[in-house]
Image (spheres, rainbow, N blue to C red):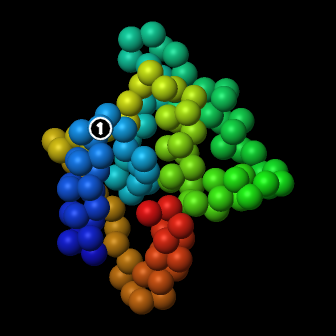
């Protein structure tokens, strides 16, 4: 998985960042700003984001797609939607680590969850 992580996070996210917006912030390598550094305005914990993320009503195909795309992509979509003046970006100098699956069943379970949000 080292190769996959390198490609998807160092290359793909860096490329998306050139356009000032990453469309899916992966939980394994993401750091969120809870509040704006300059104004203290809630971002990640804003009322709009929290309420939308907590929504479980699925009465349209659009809502079903949003809720089943995976939590990483859905949360990223909400952040971009409710905070259009802020950006999602990749930082090459950041250091992060994750624990890769150690056996086949855990790997397959991970893939089943990830397939919708990548």
Q: Residues within 10 Å of mark 1 (few under 14, many from 20)?
A: few
Nearest to the observer: residue 29 or residue 64: 64
User: Is 52 drawn above or below residue 12 in the view shown?
Assistant: above
Q: Which residue is at 72% across, 44% downward?
A: 54
Residue under circle 1? 19
Dividing the picture into quadrants, the one containing residue 4 is bottom left
Residue 17 visible in the snapshot:
yes
- Residue 38 x %, y %: 39, 11
Residue 106 visible in the snapshot:
no
Residue projecting furthest to the left = 93
Q: Please give left or right for residue 98 compared with residue 79 in the image.
A: left
Q: Please give left or right for residue 56 compared with residue 19 in the image.
A: right
- Residue 36 x %, y %: 44, 19
Q: Secondary structure at mark 1?
A: loop
User: Is 72 drawn above or below residue 84 in the view shown?
Assistant: below
User: Is 109 drawn above or below residue 105 in the view shown?
Assistant: above
Q: Please give left or right for residue 3 compared with residue 39 in the image.
A: left
> Dividing the image into 4 quarters, which one contains the C terminus?
bottom left
Dividing the picture into quadrants, the one containing residue 6 is bottom left
Dividing the picture into quadrants, the one containing residue 70 is bottom right
Q: Which residue is at 34% across, 67% downward?
A: 99
Q: Which residue is at 75% across, 45% downward?
A: 55
């Amino acid at each position: 998985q080292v190769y996959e992580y390198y490609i998807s996070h160092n290359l793909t996210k860096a490329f998306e960042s050139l356009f000032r917006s990453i469309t899916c912030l992966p939980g394994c390598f993401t750091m969120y700003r809870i509040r704006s550094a300059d104004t203290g305005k809630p971002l990640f914990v804003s009322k709009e984001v929290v309420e939308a993320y907590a929504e479980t009503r699925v009465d349209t195909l659009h809502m079903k797609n949003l809720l089943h795309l995976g939590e990483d992509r859905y949360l990223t979509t909400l952040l971009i939607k409710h905070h259009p003046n802020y950006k999602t970006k990749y930082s090459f100098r950041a250091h992060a680590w994750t624990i890769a699956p150690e056996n086949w069943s855990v790997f397959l379970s991970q893939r089943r969850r990830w397939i919708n949000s990548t």
